Amino acid sequence: MVTVTIDNKSVEVKEGTTVLNAARQAGIEIPTLCDHPHLTPFGGCRLCMVEIDGFRTLQSACTIPVSNNMVVRTNTSKVQDARKFVLTLIFSERNHFCPYCQVADGDCELQNSAYREGMTHWPLQPNWQPYPVDASHPYFILEHNRCILCRRCIRACSELVGVNTLGVEERGAKTFIIADLNVPLGESTCVSCGSCVQVCPTGALIDRRSAYRGRSEIVEHHQTVCIGCSLGCGVDVQTRDGQLVRIDGDWDAPINQGVLCKVGRYLPLEDDRERVTAPFVRENGELKSSSWEEALGLTIQKLKPLIGQAGSNVAALASDRLPAEALYRFKQVFSDGFKSTMVTSLDEGKFTASVSQFAAEIGKPFEGSLDDLHSAGSYIVFGANLIDEHEVAGFFIRRTLQSGKRLIVVDSAKNELGELANCLISPKPGTEMAFVKALGAAVAKLGLNKIAYNGDASQALADQAHKCGVSTDSLLEAAFQFAGVENPVFIYDLVNIKDAAVLGALLDLAKLAGATLFNPKGGANSLAAAQYNLNQPFALNGHKAVVVALGDDQPSERLVRALEKSPFLIVLASHASKLTAKADVVLPVETWLEQEGHYLNADGRLQLAQKSLAAPENVWSSLEVLNKFASLLNVRVNNNWDKELTKRVSPVEIHARLLQE
């Protein structure tokens, strides 16, 4: 620890802390434009200049580290003159029409800095040259007239996401932010994560949907959890007058630290499906609007006679986008109450059944966590699509590759992450076991094994390489890249593994290489559904009624076809779909932003998703509907949803501390 004095205030900070961060710890504000807490210090804007005793010139507070007994002055006349001069130059370079800007009056860091320094006009008149506007991107706009070249967007694209789409061309006043080799943003390698928009200090990058819909000071902020996949990223949902305005990443969220993908940031704003706002019942072949009393009456009339008929009486499916509380109640009503043997989730255990069964067989968790991705020295991505699914996990990998980490992609199909891989291996489809054994033998042959290897490694390598159709040289190279470093991580997503022995071989390989296993596990609450045993394949087999708790999920064509011959179909849904069109009863329920409940993410963290919007009048939560079912059907229920999560051995350790305080 070192002691530094800033504006006559002494503060003790860790060695290596910048003057800017030391001032923040002391409660002293130093203005800056290019600095961001989640980005590497850059020192480009020069607005944070300070006087330091012993230095001949002013220094940038964001880049210079403190030293013991350093004396800093942040608000002298020399510093104030420098700040005004820096701001004057910034305003003169581009067309900053503050009164007409989307982020004016409180949200723009440039404007706030000018007001803070007492500036009311431009000392240097801008040259008013028109600068281009790139509106080719589907989700946001690049407005060069408002750009101050702070390069936050470029650094976010590189440091937070690892995509490196953004850069600069030309020099001096002709410098411009560009995408790739100066192609339109909409035609670039941009992955639409929106990190650049979130870190932009001015209105140079603006969302199409949220622009001109209210400043951050007059919107309501709701910290909640994205349920686009199983990672459970923290989001800041911004609403105004009951309308969704914008979604940002939550910088304080432990999982994503502010980083989001387009599924979490933009797709919820693009959801223009027709909303179901009243119950519907089918009469004379047509769905007609009805009251809750009528719709529930018809539902109970159909279901009540079936409650004593175990087996094939009622089939029930629930979306894994529902909170754990609703999934548990769903299980209680249909598995425990009706004794039905066909109660499952919409993903039917495709991502969880095998791993849950294997965990039960060995009697303990066997996987690591998302945190392991940050400290990994190398990665094998085995069958996992981290570009279209669980993309934030892909970002974690991509950004570490820039520091020399190794990536091996193994997939029988095309995997876009393979373009960044040090090794790309395509084994024959269905030869997962042979590949895992071959890689283990390759690790042992190179002498990189952390535990003893049983058998002849050379012979096993040759035999298994032949079976999986991969050359021994490729396997040896992959083994060297993977096991030759500290903390290797093996990310796998083998859907519907028929041979559970593959998971046993994977675990053996992990022990051999000193690696950690991690499986993304599908949808938002897929792991919770698996813990409740809602993870079996779905099939209609003489069932007299089907109940689908769809929520705001989008039914697949396969599900719609599977339920075409359902004798009586009850759907709990928030949006109209092909499934609700076939239903006999439709009950309107809340969307993910209108409900509250807990989600168990892929690495066992239990998180509370807060309500961000009020549901339309006459719309119930899925849990309320299921509670009504239980009451009208005389099914005994309890609220031990959290205790039930840990009764079954999980593939990962479940952290049962509720994050609702």
Image (cartoon, rainbow, N blue to C red):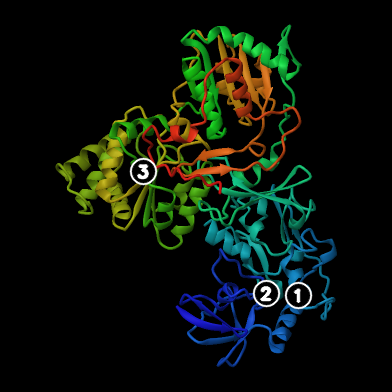
Residue 287 coordinates in the image, percent (x, y):
73, 14
Vertical comparison of 79 with 625: above or below: below
Left or right: 25 in relation to 410: right
Q: Specify the quadrant of the image occupied by residue 155.
A: bottom right
Q: Are marks 2 and 1 in contact (CB under 8 Å)?
A: yes
Quarter of the picture holding the N terminus = bottom left
The first of marks 2 and 1 along the sequence is: 2
| Residue 472 at least partly seen | no
Question: What residue is disc 1 on?
Answer: 116
Residue 119 coordinates in the image, percent (x, y):
81, 77
In the structure shown, which secondary structural element does the residue marked by tag 1 occupy?
helix
Left or right: 371 in relation to 363: right
Q: CA distance from mark 3 to mark 1?
A: 51 Å
Q: Amino acid at mark 2?
A: Pro
Question: What residue is disc 2 on?
Answer: 31
Vertical comparison of 332 with 393: above or below: above
Q: Which mark is residue 509?
A: none
In the structure shown, which secondary structural element does the residue marked by tag 2 occupy?
loop
Residue 429 coordinates in the image, percent (x, y):
37, 32
In the structure shown, which secondary structural element does the residue marked by tag 3 occupy?
loop
Q: Nearer the viewer, residue 523 or 436?
A: 523
Question: What residue is disc 3 on?
Answer: 367
Q: Count neighbours of disc 2 (C-alpha within 10 A) and say few if under 14, some if 14 to 19, many if 20 or more.
A: many
| Residue 509 at least partly seen | yes
